[in-house]
Image (spheres, helix red, strand yellow):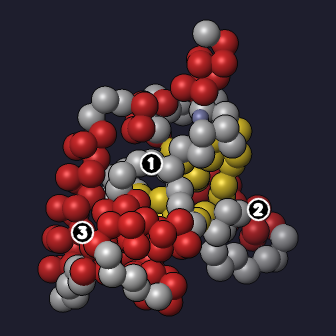
Amino acid sequence: MVQSIDPGQAFPARCDYHSGCRERLLSAAESLCRESGTSLTANRRAVLDILSESHHSLGAYDILERMDAGAGRRPGPAAVYRALEFLSGLGLVHRLGSRNSWFACSRPGEHRGRSQYWICANCGVVGETESEEIAQILPELALSMAFRLDRVSIEIEGECRGCQLQIKG
Ligand SMILES: [Zn+2]
Ligand SMILES: [Zn+2]
């Protein structure tokens, strides 16, 4: 029997404390930068700010467009990619390989890089879980096939609870 997960925990977008998510993310960004001796440059902060507006994923060019609309100064795509690379290195944002897009982590610093990403194909919201069962089974399977496992990425597509309720109701 697999341990069940409260949808509100995996999909914080469905809770009403979203502003709390944003503050948590920004304060985690500052302390992680301090700890790692780096700094949250204007570009990095702007990218993080845009991603922290929702729990939906955005492509680099969507981010670029929003940066343009805001401050009136336009960084190049390379600067956006560098900022994303930096932020995902600290676990503040995560990349969805299947969509080549990024989203803000809901519990920065708590995820150990073994998350499963749940993507709603309807509204685009992304939930994150860290199932121990899934994390354990893959290395075991790999071993049985004599496969050297380097990196695991699990992205599941479907429909979130909020969308299902809306469609039914
Ligand atoms: Zn995360
Ligand atoms: Zn949805």
When asked about the image quadrant of residue 34, the answer is bottom left
Q: Nearer the viewer, residue 29 or 64?
A: 64
Residue 3 spot, x, y in % from top left: 54, 33
Name which residue type carries label 3.
Ala
Task: Report the side of 86 relative to 134 (left or right).
Answer: left
Cα–Cα gap, marks 1 and 2: 32 Å
Which element type, helix, strand or loop, lies under badge 1? loop
Cα–Cα gap, marks 1 and 3: 17 Å
Residue at (22% x, 87% y) in the render: 38
Camera-side mark, 3 or 2: 3
Cα–Cα gap, marks 3 and 2: 36 Å
Residue of label 2: 141
Residue 24 spot, x, y in % from top left: 22, 53
Residue at (69% x, 76% y) in the render: 149
Residue 141 spot, x, y in % from top left: 76, 62
Q: Earlier in the sequence, mark 3 or mark 2?
A: 3
Q: Earlier in the sequence, mark 1 or mark 3?
A: 3
Checking the image for residue 29, the label placed there is 3
Q: Is residue 129 above or below residue 8?
A: below
Task: Report the side of 15 relative to 113 (left or right).
Answer: left
Ligand 2 image-quadrant field: top right
Q: Are marks 3 and 2 in contact (CB under 8 Å)?
A: no
- Decide: few, some or many residues near mark 1? Use Cα within 10 Å; few <14, some 14-19, many ≥20: many
Checking the image for residue 55, the label placed there is 1
Q: Are marks 1 and 3 in contact (CB under 8 Å)?
A: no
Q: Earlier in the sequence, mark 1 or mark 2?
A: 1
Farthest residue toward the right?
Answer: 145
Which element type, helix, strand or loop, lies under badge 3? helix
Residue 132 can be seen in this image = no
Residue at (67% x, 63% y) in the render: 99
Name which residue type carries label 2.
Leu
